[in-house]
Structures are given as structure tokens and as C-alpha cells.
Image (tube, helix red, strand yellow):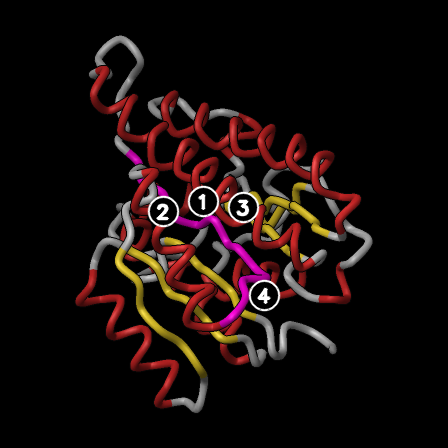
Amino acid sequence: MAGVEGRVALVTGAAQGIGRAIALMLAQGGATVAAVDIMEDKLAGVVDEITRAGGKAAAFKMNVTDEDNVKQVVKDIVARFGKLEILVNNAGIARDQLIMRMKRADWDLVVGINLTGVFLCTQAAVPVMLKQRWGRIVNIASIFGQMGQAGQVNYSASKAGVIGLTMATAREVASRNITVNAIAPGFIETAMTQALAPELRETMFKQIPLGRPGYDTDVANAVRFLASEEANYITGHVLKVNGGMLMG
């Protein structure tokens, strides 16, 4: 089996942005996609987009910070599709503020979704993959988890945590033919970045050797590769998708 054809993939945060692009890309590759998010209306639109294009997908409402909810949704996915082979931990949030002014609630919210959510989803999915003796886990980290960013101590810390979690989990499950990798996107064009002032965007682009932002499909392509059979000898790796903004 080449690529991701015939696989069953769970994608968190699939209702919009990078998560939507990942869900579409995996479906285009022949995977059946369990699209997961708390935003049911937008999620239904993504599933409809996939099915209209001839792909296979189903929507599951899930809060990645609710342990019982996560466990139940994973059970529901396995009950519906018979297996779960690919997990993409993409759900994330930002609440930016300088550390001196950051509220504890904003720290807890960001770390809860971005890091604890990855832990809970991975913990729920791994037993299924262990029984199958095959699995691919891809975690969406960030360039700021590698180099930090002023005003984002909560976000940067959560994404650095995702990288550590990725490497530790990779060591735990490698003997069962399960790989665990992370992708660290840089400046990706989204609705939020498009709203930035032109001069700020220009300043950002000057920090990128390729001279332009990345796109959600750039991240999605990387996910599809790491989730594939072709990436079977890659684990514990952090793939930089950042246009050269951070090297080494």
C-alpha cells in the first residue's frame, strides 16, 4: 500500500485553516478521514467538501481537553471504520500577551489545548495502534516552539512541549511499527496573517530566505508524507516547514 490510501486518519482541529487542508489532503490521498473539532457547522462543511470530491469522511465533535470525550470519540471512530491508523494532532489556539501581563487563564487555556490535548488524543489512540502493529502520529508544533516569540510564552511553551512529547512517545512505540513525528510550521498564510499591516508582513518576509509565507497546503503535504508508508524509517523527527526562517 503506497501513500495513505486505505488508511483511517483522525485529524483534530479539522474545521478550518491548516486542519482543514490536512483533512482534504489525506482524503485526496485515499484515506478515510475522521474530521474532529468542536465547531460542528464548519466541520460539516469540510466533510461535505471531501465527499463531494469523491473522498470518504465523517465528522466527530470533540473537545481535546476533555479526557472522557476524547476516549469516547476514538472508540466511536474505531467502531465505525474498524481501525485507526493515522492521528494528526493539529488542534491549537493562541492567546498572546507579554508575560508580565498574561493571565493565568490564558496560560492554562493554551497549554491545555495545545499540549494536554495532544497527550490525551495520543494516549487514546496508541492502544489501538499497538494492537494493529502499525501507526502514524503527526503532531503540529511551531517554529516558535523552537526559537520562542515575544508575547507568546504560553504558545511557545506549549509547542516546545509538543516537540518533547513527540520524541518521548516515538521511543516508546517504535518497536510496534508506530512512528511519531512533528511538523514545525513557520509563517503560514492564514486569515489572521492576511489581516496584518502591509509593513509588518514585509518585515516578516525579510526574515524568510524564500521571501514569502507558506501555505496550508505546504503543511498538509508534509503531513501526508509523514503519515505514509514511504516515511516508515522516520520517527522522533521535527520537520521544519518554514521557508528557511530557522535552519539547523
**Which residue is located at x 64 percent, y 61 percent?**
227
Kindly report which numbered mark, 4 or 1, lies closer to the viewer in this rendering.
1
> Seen in the image, is 98 located left or right of residue 39?
right
**Which residue is located at x 45 percent, y 23 percent?**
157
> Seen in the image, is 37 located left or right of residue 123?
left
> Which quarter of the picture shows residue 115?
top left
Mark toward the start of the polypeptide (1 vs 3): 1
- The main secondary structure of the magenta stretch is loop
What crowding class fits label 3: few (fewer than 14 Cα within 10 Å), some (14-19), or many (20 or more)?
A: many
Mark toward the start of the polypeptide (4 vs 1): 1
Q: CA distance from mark 1 to mark 3?
A: 11 Å
Mark 1 near mark 3, Cβ–Cβ under 8 Å?
A: no
State the SS at label 4. Answer: helix
Magenta segment = 82-94
> Badge 3 is on which residue?
139
Q: CA distance from mark 1 to mark 2?
A: 6 Å
How far across and down, in percent of the image, does residue 120 sit? 43, 38
Kindly report which numbered mark, 4 or 3, lies closer to the viewer in this rendering.
3
State the SS at label 1. Answer: helix
State the SS at label 3. Answer: strand
Is residue 90 within the magenta segment?
yes
Mark 2 near mark 4, Cβ–Cβ under 8 Å?
A: no
How far across and down, in percent of the image, does residue 4 sit? 63, 72
Total numbered badges shown on the rendered structure: 4
Mark 4 near mark 1, Cβ–Cβ under 8 Å?
A: no
Mark toward the start of the polypeptide (2 vs 4): 2
Q: CA distance from mark 4 to mark 1?
A: 22 Å
Q: What kind of residue is marked 1?
A: Cys
Q: Which mark is residue 121?
A: 1
> Badge 2 is on which residue?
70
Name the one closer to the observer, 221 or 228: 228
Residue 26, compared with residue 142, is above or below; it is: below
